[in-house]
Structure formats: C-alpha cells, structure tokens
Amino acid sequence: MTDAQDPRPLLRSSFEQSIHLVGAVVPDQFGNPTPCADFDVRTLIGHMAFAASRIAAAGRRGAIPDDGPAITGVSDGDWPDVFENMARDAIEAWANDAALEGEIELPFGTFPAAVVAMIYAQEQVTHGWDLAVATGQVPKLDPALAEAVLPIVQQMIPADVRGGEMPFEAVIEVPPTASVYDRLAAYLGRQPR
C-alpha cells in the first residue's frame, strides 16, 4: 500500500501538529473562544482528545466511546501531557497494517477502515486550525495537511446538506487566493480569519 492510499501518514501528521499546538497553549488562553462556536480552547482540546480516544478504539476494533463530545476534568497544566499521550496512543493503534482492514462502525455510520482514519485526520486538522486561530498559532500550521484534507472534506461533506444531522454551517464564500486553511474553514462553515 502506498502513502497515497494509506491514510496513516496523514493521521499521524495531523496528530503531531495537534500535539505541538496544544503544547504551546499558555495558561491565560484556555478560556478563549474558538471559531468552533461550541467550544472554548479548554473544551476544544478536550474534544480533540475525545476524538483521539475514538480513533484509538477504532484502530484496535474496541468499543467506540460515544459519550463525548469532550473529555473534561483535566487541569489546564496537565493538558499538554494528557493530550500527547492520547494522540500517541491513537497513532499506535493504527500502526499495524491490519488496522486498515474491513469496516468500522462509528456512532454516525459504518465506513471502510481507511475512511475512518481520514475522517479523524480531517477532524484534527480542522480543529487544529480552530485552536491555532484562538491561540495565535496560525503561522505554525502546516499547509500540506490542509491541502490533503480539503478534497476529503469536499467529498465527504456535501455543500448543499448542512444543519440538523450534518453538524456544519453553510459554506462561506472565500476568494480562490485565500489560504488553504481559510478555504477549509470556509467550506466547513467557519468564518475565515
């Protein structure tokens, strides 16, 4: 299987980026609002950690947690280590080639294993942008990650079906010269910077 077919390098890179972003959050930023209206920085990190627990369970074919959307009860100072441990566990859960076999049932549908890995890579990249905007870390974002997930998002999340069961706002129009992260955010209904 080539990297073009194997979503695990993208999943790993998306978590590596998230680890760096979470590790750079300073104490007075945890209450900051984020572009994802449901979360401040603290609950966004908790949501990203919850997603890590889901994708780790999926990779091991364990029970998928459905009690989210965010892990709570972690002190702000402990989040960098807690998140890194959960992210590295998620990466490790997909290290074996068998993780890419078959289908995986998630709380919102059943998908081929490779698609599940792409879904969660996309989630980390998107929420990484949310976190970077909220904490002044946009220059640290790797544009190659957004370039990789934008076509995935455009294929998986129809532009014309938003709201209700589809937890995304309407697509926001941006110029074609907008950064790839701004185009990704706008496609998912977030107001670009």
Image: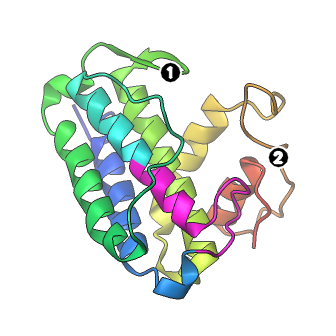
**Is residue 162 toward the left or the right of residue 88 in the image?**
right
* Type of amino acid at the residue the image marks with label 2: Val
Going 25% across and 21% down the picture, which residue do you hit? 61
Q: Viewer-proximal residue, 61 or 141?
A: 61
Q: Which residues are magenta?
A: 31-49
Local crowd size for mark 1, using a 10 Å CA cut-off: few (<14), some (14–19), many (≥20): few
Q: Is residue 7 visible?
A: no
Q: In front: mark 2 or mark 1?
A: 1
Q: Position of residue 106 (x, y in %)?
A: 45, 21
Quarter of the image for the C terminus: give it: bottom right
Q: Quadrant of residue 16?
A: bottom left
* Type of amino acid at the residue the image marks with label 1: Pro
**Is residue 22 toward the left or the right of residue 179 in the image?**
left
- Rendered view: 16 above or below 139: above
Report the disc number at residue 171. 2
Quarter of the image for the N terminus: give it: top left
**Is residue 50 toward the left or the right of residue 5 in the image?**
right
Per the image, the residue denoted by label 1 is 107
Going 79% across and 35% down the picture, which residue do you hit? 159
Q: Quadrant of residue 173?
A: bottom right
Disc 2 to disc 1, C-alpha distance: 25 Å
